[in-house]
Image: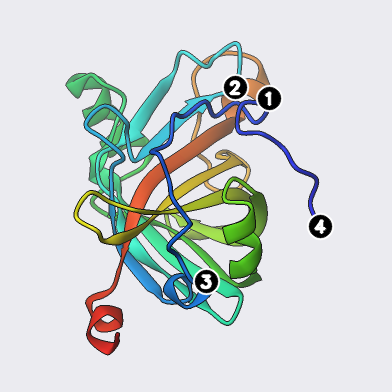
Amino acid sequence: DQPAVSWTELGLNIQSKQSSTASYKIAALEVDWENPQALDELTPLIQFNFQPPLDSYAGEAMALEGFMSWKTDFLSGEFSIPTRSITMGEKTYDDNVHKKYIKVKKFPKATLRFSSQKVLAKELLDDPGRIYELEGHLNFMGKNQAILLQASFEPFINDMGDQQLIVFAKFQTNIYKTFKVKGPDGPQQAKENMNFQAQFILSPTQTNNDNN
């Protein structure tokens, strides 16, 4: 088992929704999940930044698509970002990044995949804030890089009585080593390594609902 680590210690300070697992059953978790949505209007789906002292170079992805499948205590998933939705908050700068650095016309998506990772549903219900380490692969600009993803899952029932799942995730990657994307001027360690944080809500697929 991985040692318990708080999201604050990981540097991801997010106020999650009030989650309730009291009315959840394991069968309610072990389904297919889809349709990632923002936690609220002020919380980005995906955030990223370079490492200090270059952490002022930061941005977000405005769109996210994908799914997650939970079958008999094994979790797999695939999530993609339309690269054109990546922004650093200034249109002229975004246009330069899109054309010169990440070439959005040639590479319209960045995709993260992970498969067959053991995540016990019962364990999650007993400890909703538990952090898991998941091995995955990031496909970006036509190249693949192995990553280690730290993730947490919080099931809850929304105001409409629907079951939903909050996903928090974090990983770091060297954007130059594999993808040859040059960062801003600064120390090599800082300009080559980027931190990513994700936070979103998933809903059960309609097929799950039809079968219930």
Secondary structure found at label 4 = loop
Nearer the observer, 101 or 165? 165
Q: Quadrant of the C terminus?
A: bottom left
N-terminal-most mark, 3 or 4? 4
N-terminal-most mark, 4 or 1? 4
Mark 4 sits on what residue?
A: 1
Q: Residue 116: x, y in percent?
A: 61, 76
Separation of marks 2 and 4 at Cα, in angstroms: 28 Å
The vertical placement of 25 against 125, above or below, is below
Q: Are marks 1 and 2 in contact (CB under 8 Å)?
A: yes
N-terminal-most mark, 3 or 1? 3
Residue at left offset 65%, top offset 15%: 187
Quick check: can you spot residue 107?
A: no
Residue at left offset 34%, top offset 63%: 66
The vertical placement of 72 against 98, above or below, is below
Compared across the picture, whether 124 is left or right of 61 comes to right
> Image quadrant of residue 103?
top left
Compared across the picture, whether 93 is left or right of 46 comes to left
Kind of residue indicated by mark 1 = Gln
Q: Residue 206: x, y in percent?
A: 22, 77
Q: Are marks 2 and 4 in contact (CB under 8 Å)?
A: no
Kind of residue indicated by mark 3 = Ser
Q: Residue 209: x, y in percent?
A: 25, 79
| Number of residues whose C-alpha sits closer than 10 Å to that of mark 3, classed few (under 14), some (14–19) or many (20 or more) | some
Q: What label does residue 51 carry, if any?
A: 2
Mark 3 sits on what residue?
A: 76
Q: Are marks 3 and 1 in contact (CB under 8 Å)?
A: no
| Number of residues whose C-alpha sits closer than 10 Å to that of mark 4, classed few (under 14), some (14–19) or many (20 or more) | few
